[in-house]
Image (spheres, grey):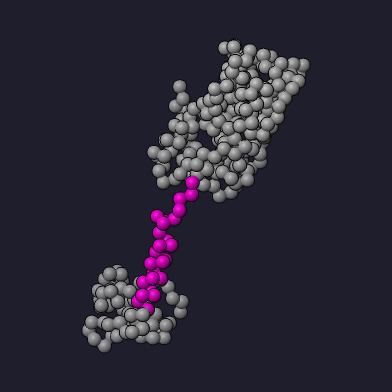
Amino acid sequence: MTMELRHLRAFLAIADEGTITRAAARLHTGQPALSRTLRQLEDHLGVRLIDRSTHHLELTAAGRAFRERAAAALAAVDAALDPRALPVLPLRLGHPWAAFGEHTVPLLRRWDAEHPDVPLQLRRIDDRTAGLTRGAVDVALLRGEVTAPGLVTELLLEEERVAVVPAGSEPAGHETLTLADLAAWPIALNTVAGTTTLDLWPAGARPTRTIEVANTDEWLTAIAAGRAVGISTAATPRLHDHPTIAYRPLADAPAVPLFLAWRAGVPVHPAIPALVRLVREMVAARP
């Protein structure tokens, strides 16, 4: 017959207790059933493991050797089945820029306090879905229209747009700017993950010069060097403060939606629902 873990546990209980009676009590089973289990194990191995010729049972030489193997086997099984020994997978939160804006640090702090057993890793990945569609992250903060197939999205809020201009430049001298104020400048466009396009301007009043960049760092550098101006959302100044860049409200540009997104139809990280709940709470608590 097929050997099972109960055969090893039965043998070890008898070896430890020295009698069938005490071993049966320890395992919460009957003495006849325990004796049958021991005989099945001995029949399978083809050797006598326990000498039953005396009132107090004794291990045979084969029994003493098998005891070490059985104990090691059970310890390995118990370790493999112990959920506390399993590594905890971090929850990877991707973003292409600005993350959760001013809420980023409070989010990380609350997560650490409320979910100390699940690390929340913030990862900036410069592509349209912040690595979500290729499995580089488990969930992502995405701005603008989300067109990638196979994603579940939840609208969190809408962020006002801001003009981003070189400090000390003429536009920086205004408290508020308009799209027309920026049109004479080259416009820095992040073509990989940005939300700004020339379609923001009316057809007859669009900027004639652009500088295309591939990531946030290049975008910030182009503006700081005075080569261009840019447009972003109110979340950007919170995470990208720069001494040679000025941020000004942009009066006539539409707001940008911010979504929390994760993949549909695939095994998802079990902590995603908890993150969704926490983000909802933080958005609802905004003044």
Give the image quarter of residue 145.
top right
**Residue 255 image offset from top left, x and y in percent:** 60, 23
Residue at the image position 44 percent from the left and 76 percent from the top: 3
Q: Does the magenta stretch include residue 84?
A: yes
Q: Which of 69 and 123 is in front in this view?
A: 123
Q: In which quarter of the image is residue 83?
A: bottom left
Q: Which residue lies furthest to the left in this view?
A: 55
As displayed, is residue 41 above or below residue 139? below
Q: Position of residue 267 (x, y in %)?
A: 55, 50
Q: In this view, does 53 lie to the left or right of 158?
A: left
Residue 199, visible in the rendered structure: no
In which quadrant will I find the C terminus?
top left
What residue occupies the far top of the structure in this picture? Answer: 174
x and y percentages locating residue 286 in the rendered image:
46, 25
The one nearer the camera, 155 or 87, is 87
Left or right of residue 182: residue 157: left
Residue for point 64% across, 36% down: 128
Whether residue 115 sits left or right of residue 56 in the image: it is right
Q: Name the residue at the bottom extreme.
A: 53
Residue 111 belongs to the span the image colors magenta? no
Q: Where is residue 162 in the image (x, y as percent from the top left)?
A: 59, 20
Q: Looking at the picture, tell me which residue is in the foreground, 248 or 149.
A: 248
* Residue range of the region highlighted in magenta in the rendering: 66-90
Is 174 left, or right, of 187 in this rendering? left
Q: 204 or 125, which lies in front?
A: 125
Q: Relative to residue 178, is residue 17 depicted above or below?
A: below
The residue located at (26%, 74%) in the rendering is: 17
Is 10 rendered above or below residue 175?
below
Main SS of residues in magenta? helix
